[in-house]
Amino acid sequence: TTTVHYDEDADVSPLESKTVAVLGYGSQGHAHALNLHESGIDVVVGLRESSSSRSAAEAEGLRVETPREAAAEADLVSVLVPDTVQPRVYEEIRDVMEAGDTLQFAHGFNIHYGQIEPSDDVNVTMVAPKSPGHLVRRNYENGEGTPGLLAVYQDSTGEAHDIGLAYAKAIGCTRAGVVETTFREETETDLFGEQAVLCGGVTSLVKQGYETLVDAGYSPEMAYFECLNELKLIVDLMYEGGLGEMWHSVSDTAEFGGLTRGDRIVDEHARENMEQVLEEVQDGTFAREWITENQAGRPSYKQLKHREENHEIEEVGENLRALFSWGEGADQEKEAAETP
Ligand code: NDP
Ligand code: MG
Ligand code: MG
C-alpha cells in the first residue's frame, strides 16, 4: 500500500538546528533554497566561482559559497546540479561530509546506478517534487503545494526518514502530498515515463501524425493544429478528470473513432518496444549509454537534438504561434486590445 504524508504528519523541527547546503541554483535549486529559507531553515547555496546564478541568489538574501565550502558547513547537502554533473561535484565534497550528515537528492539516477557511492556513515535521502522548479516555487509562494516523492536509501542516524519528511515540508510538498517510494522505483519509473510516454513517446506520436497528414497533401498548418496544438486541450481534460473526463468532453464521433483506432496506432508492437525500453532502464543499458555519451562529449545527443530542432513542424509552429495569440499572456493581450 502507498503511504502519503501531508502537512499534519510532518514536522520541520529535524531541520531547525541544521544548516542546509543547496548545490546549484537552477530549476530545482532556486526553488528549494528559497522555500527552505522562507520556512525558517538556515540555507547556504553552493555555486562554482564562475556561476552566473551567483548574483540572483545573493539578491534574494541567500548566502553563496563554493559547493565544497557550503557542504563543509552544512548538516544536509541537497544535490541540485544537473544529474550528469553530480558525480563530479560529489568528488569535490565527499571528504568534507561528516558522519551523520545527510546527502539529499531530487532524482535517484546517480545513487541507483552507482555513479555516486556515499560512505556508510551518512544518510542518503530523496525528496523529488513531481514538477519543474518554477512551479515548486510559485506554488509555495501562493500557499499551495507541489506533490512529491520521499525515499531513504541509507539511514545512518535513525533519523533519515524524519529529516527527509522535514525537507519535504519545508519546500511545500506535504501541502499537496508526499508519496513514499524507493530510489529504484523513482529512478526506473521516471526514466521509463519520460522515454516511453511523456517526452519520447508523445513527440514521436505528434511527428508521425503530422507527417502522415502533410505527406497525404494536407496543409502543414492544419496538420500542426490537429496533431500538436490540440494536444494541450486533450491533456488538460485528462489531467483534470482522467481519461473519462476527456472521453466525456469530446464528441461521440471522436470517442468512437478514438476507441476503435487508438489501439491500432499504439499496438502490440509499441507495447513490446515499451517493454524493451523498460528492460534497458532496469538492467542499466540506458544509464551506461547516457554516461558514455556524456564522457564522449555528447555526439549523438547533439546530432539528434539538431535533427529535432530542424523538423518542419517547428518552423510551421513558430510562424503560427506568432500569428495567433493563445497561451500565456494571451488574455492580457486580448484585454489590452479591447481597451479603447
Ligand atoms: P539545472 O540544470 O537547472 O541546474 C543548474 C544549476 O546547476 C545552475 O545553478 C548551475 O550553475 C549548476 N551547475 C551546472 N553545472 C555545474 C558544475 N559543473 N558545477 C557546479 N554547478 C553546476 O538542474 P535541475 O534543477 O533541472 O536538476 C537538478 C536535480 O533535480 C536533478 O537531479 C534533476 O533530475 C532533479 N529534478 C529536476 C526537475 C526539473 O523539472 N528540472 C524535476 C524533478 C527533479 P552555473 O551557473 O554554475 O552553471
Ligand atoms: Mg526525469
Ligand atoms: Mg478534431
Image (cartoon, rainbow, N blue to C red):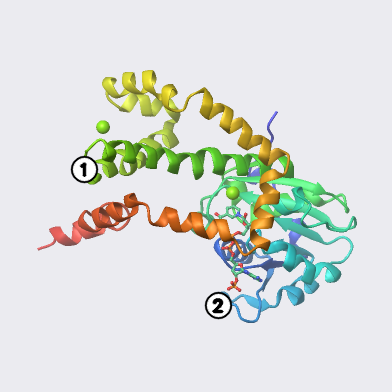
Whichever of callouts 2 and 1 sits on the residue coming sooner in the sequence is 2
Residue 85 percent coordinates (x, y)? 67, 64
Real-space Cα separation, disc 2 to disc 1, in angstroms: 44 Å
Q: Which mark is residue 90?
A: none
Residue 103 in sight here: yes
The residue furthest left is: 340
Residue type at tag 2 = Ser
Q: In the rendered image, which quarter is residue 193 located in?
A: top right
Q: Nearer the viewer, residue 143 or 198?
A: 198
Q: Label 1: which residue?
A: 219
Q: Residue at x 45, y 59 (%)?
A: 306
Residue type at tag 1 = Ser
The residue at label 2 has a CB less than 8 Å from ligand 1: yes
Check disc 2: other Cα within 10 Å, few if <14, some if 14-19, many if 20+: few
Q: Label 2: which residue?
A: 52
Q: Nearer the viewer, residue 246 or 38?
A: 246
Left or right, 141 with respect to 39, comes to: left
Check disc 1: other Cα within 10 Å, few if <14, some if 14-19, many if 20+: few
Residue 179 percent coordinates (x, y)? 65, 40
